């Protein structure tokens, strides 16, 4: 038994948590109190399902020293649909879950298959839960179609992650009742800006336009400066608090973006029509009107509701071309707007200077875009390039967001801030150790400032391992959240920051607009009684509760409000933060699916790549040409023992000294694609031998055994391992993966390969002298 000194009997109490399944049949209970997860062996997983709420008790430690337990009670079984493929085997109908964390197939009684056919993707509703000696039973609730149907990956993702994808009838009816254009009555009490040449600047494929900008020179005190206008779609004018549209918008909390498809937060009539700042039509907006000094400091600002008229719709590419050549063909087409764009460029450069003074973190990272054909198949994956126009708009939006946060804080009104805290103590220690191990002359203090991170990035940008160092700097930071308690934004180096600029696609921005309007009218905004946040909110709330810390010596600006009011805002912030994560996870799942389908067509092909992460069980490699990431399992790195160096974040061979760290260049072959698991496996070729030779030379050792001792060994055991290896981090997982592998004609069976590998390893060990301790 695991002892617990706080319990009189010395035994650990029963604890509540959520079951998290694993594709190898194991699982764990994620505890509500934030303590170490309780691992569940396969026999314990038989009677529970992934996402079940349970009470569990620790009964022992496993051989890796982890707390192992058993489930004593199922507290709650959420109504969750299971998505999978319908199979007919030996006269029995069953559904194999697409999410392998469920661990068990679902039996479908005869007559409960509906219209589904063998091999189709279906949604199953459970009618009988699993038991220790019995599989779960269910019925087909919905037929999604064939696995290769265009858009099937999105249909699966929205159901898998519980993304609301159909508007309620009440919401649709309410949106239809809205006008098609701005009416004269809508303009009352608004500033008329229709004569100001505001323009939108967005991507080529944008359909909803949240923001428009305009800039002109202005006196700031006695010095030169600029007047910068950021006009944002006034969604709050049409979406009333607690209305049917508002309830659906809150439930979604954000638009979800997939390749070729968007699931919007608002009905299309609003998102692409009435609220979108389309060119050459009048639109209602909320304006942040700023005076910016020559050094980029925001000297003054004001907010007001207005009516505007977009004078042009620009793309980022077009604006970048005009700014690069004001006499070029792009500028000639837009000669009336060139001067305004130059003013925007000038104020952007000033704001950029201020960003540098603040010490805001500004790392360049590569984001990718998936280009699909009409059938939904990937044609290519290309990097998203950020040009001058992207940065220009970004700085203008940051300025408006900062003014919004300041306005809410000064108005002493509760609202949602976008908070990004500094690294946790654990992450600080890991980063310090890494920087020291890598010989970086700089480090971070106990209470680090963003400028310290930027200074390290600037000092190392010319080093060959710059990418590795910058990646570690980014990984040491926490995720940003929405909360009514203002703790500042670490990465951007702001004392207060919020989201004001995208109310068409983010619910927190809509709330910020309502709060600003309440302050302007000297009233108080009351959050509506909205539906209780779902599972995503509950999970995030527990995670956040587990890392609550005492306030710092210098308290941040706090809003004074009744406890119940603050709690309501906290719930709204948690809900929006959790659904933001949900949207990100669903998007990543779809991208991973598409990349796996894409790479299935490239099995056996060779590519150059860069190590993007090193772990105890192998290295992840991102291909140069494809921007696709896959795993080279540790068993593929050559015939020697590799040890993971946590400080250096690298794998190092004990015999040869060969090292694989973030940024190491390698050449790999695509060896396996697991569509269900969203995983791609590579095997190392050629470059592995070069690295071995180099490492051996550095150690002054002559390499023995030739190429066969390197990473290109062709033993039948490794060939089988390439087809079946797991991404797990234990020998048990690797064994389970090999034993579950599929056989191929003319190849050893998985079991034969496994036995052969064990025998070879045993023979190698014979006669070897034991290592000195």
Image (cartoon, grey):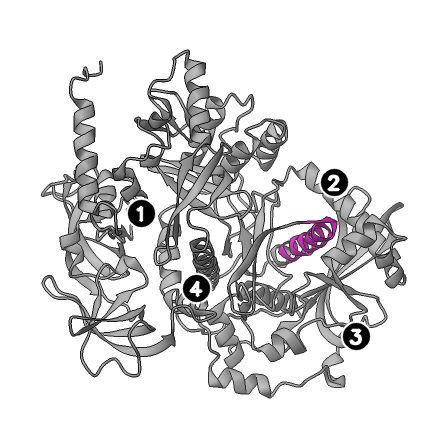
Q: Residue at x 41, y 14 (%)?
A: 699
Is 197 placed left or right of 604 in the picture?
A: right
Chain-order first, disc 3 or disc 1: 3
Callout 1: SS = helix
The N terminus: image quadrant: top left
Q: Which label number is shown at residue 723? A: 1
User: Gap in Å between the C-alphas at discs 2 and 3?
Assistant: 34 Å
Name which residue lies at 49% across and 48% down. 628
Lower position in the chain sequence, tag 2 or tag 3: 3
| Stretch of the chain drawn in magenta | 386-407
| Label 4: element kind | helix
Of badges 1 and 4, the one in the foreground is 1
Residue 132 higher or lower than 719, as above or below: below
User: In the rendered view, would you say 711 is above or below 49?
Assistant: above
Residue at mark 4: 564
Quarter where residue 311 is shown: bottom right
């Amino acid at each position: 038994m695991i002892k617990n000194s706080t319990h009189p009997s010395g035994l650990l109490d029963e604890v509540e948590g959520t079951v998290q399944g694993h594709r190898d049949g194991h699982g764990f209970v994620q505890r509500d109190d934030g303590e170490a997860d309780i691992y569940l062996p396969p026999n314990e997983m038989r009677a529970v399902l992934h996402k079940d709420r349970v009470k569990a008790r620790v009964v022992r430690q496993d051989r890796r020293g982890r707390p192992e337990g058993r489930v004593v009670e199922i507290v709650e079984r959420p109504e969750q649909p299971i998505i999978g493929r319908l199979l007919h085997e030996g006269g029995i109908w069953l559904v194999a879950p697409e999410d392998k964390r469920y661990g068990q197939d679902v039996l479908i009684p005869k007559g409960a298959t509906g219209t589904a056919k063998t091999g189709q993707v279906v949604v199953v509703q459970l009618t009988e839960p699993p038991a220790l000696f019995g599989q779960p039973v269910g019925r087909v609730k919905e037929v999604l179609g064939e696995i290769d149907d265009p858009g099937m990956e999105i249909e699966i993702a929205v159901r898998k992650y519980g993304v609301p994808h159909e508007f309620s009838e009440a919401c649709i009816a309410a949106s239809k009742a809205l006008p098609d254009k701005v009416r004269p009555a809508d303009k009352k009490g608004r500033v008329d800006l229709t004569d100001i040449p505001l323009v939108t600047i967005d991507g080529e494929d944008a359909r909803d336009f949240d923001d428009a900008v305009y800039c002109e020179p202005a006196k700031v005190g006695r010095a030169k400066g600029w007047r910068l206008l950021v006009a944002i779609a006034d969604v709050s004018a049409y979406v009333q608090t607690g209305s049917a549209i508002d309830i659906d918008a809150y439930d979604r909390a954000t638009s979800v973006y997939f390749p070729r498809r968007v699931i919007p937060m608002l009905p299309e009539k609003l998102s692409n029509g009435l609220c979108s700042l389309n060119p050459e039509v009048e639109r209602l907006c909320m304006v942040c009107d700023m005076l910016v000094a020559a050094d980029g400091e925001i000297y003054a600002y004001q907010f007001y509701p207005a009516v505007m008229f977009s004078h042009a719709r620009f793309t980022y590419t077009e604006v970048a071309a005009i700014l690069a050549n004001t006499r070029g063909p792009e500028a000639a087409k837009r000669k009336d707007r060139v001067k305004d764009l130059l003013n925007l460029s000038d104020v952007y450069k000033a704001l950029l200077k201020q960003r540098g003074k603040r010490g805001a973190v500004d790392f360049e990272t590569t984001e990718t875009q998936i280009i699909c054909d009409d059938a939904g198949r990937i044609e290519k994956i290309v990097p998203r390039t950020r040009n001058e126009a992207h940065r220009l708009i970004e700085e203008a939006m940051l300025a408006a967001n900062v003014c919004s946060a300041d306005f809410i804080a000064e108005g002493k009104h509760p609202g949602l801030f976008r908070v990004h805290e500094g690294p946790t103590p654990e992450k600080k220690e890991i980063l310090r150790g890494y920087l020291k191990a890598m010989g970086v002359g700089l480090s971070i203090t106990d209470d680090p400032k963003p400028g310290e991170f930027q200074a390290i990035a600037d000092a190392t940008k010319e080093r060959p391992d710059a990418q590795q160092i910058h990646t570690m700097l980014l990984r040491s930071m926490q995720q940003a959240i929405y909360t009514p308690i203002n703790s500042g934004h670490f990465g951007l180096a702001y004392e207060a920051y919020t989201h004001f600029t995208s109310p068409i696609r983010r619910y927190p921005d809509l709330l910020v607009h309502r709060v600003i309007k309440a302050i302007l009218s000297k009233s108080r905004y009351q959050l509506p009684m909205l539906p209780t946040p779902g599972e995503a909110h509950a999970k995030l709330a527990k995670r956040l509760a587990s890392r609550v810390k005492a306030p710092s010596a210098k308290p941040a600006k706090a809003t004074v409000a009744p406890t119940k009011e603050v709690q309501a805002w906290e719930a709204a912030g948690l809900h929006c933060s959790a659904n933001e994560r949900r949207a990100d996870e669903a998007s990543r799942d779809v991208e991973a699916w598409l990349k796996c389908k894409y790479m299935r067509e490239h099995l056996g092909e060779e590519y150059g790549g860069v190590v993007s992460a090193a772990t105890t069980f192998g290295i992840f490699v991102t291909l140069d040409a494809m921007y696709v990431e896959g795993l080279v399992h540790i068993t593929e790195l050559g015939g020697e023992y590799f040890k993971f160096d946590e400080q250096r974040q690298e794998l190092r061979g004990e015999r040869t000294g060969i090292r694989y760290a973030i940024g190491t260049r390698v050449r790999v072959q695509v060896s396996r694609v697991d569509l269900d698991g969203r995983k791609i496996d590579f095997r190392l070729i050629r470059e592995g031998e070069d690295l071995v030779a180099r490492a051996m030379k550095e150690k002054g050792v002559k390499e023995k055994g030739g190429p066969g001792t390197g990473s290109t060994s062709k033993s039948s055991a490794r060939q089988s391992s390439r087809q079946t290896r797991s991404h797990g981090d234990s020998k048990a997982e690797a064994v389970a993966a090999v034993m579950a592998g599929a056989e191929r004609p003319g190849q050893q069976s998985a079991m034969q390969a496994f036995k052969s590998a064990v025998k070879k390893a045993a023979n190698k060990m014979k006669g070897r002298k034991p290592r000195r301790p």
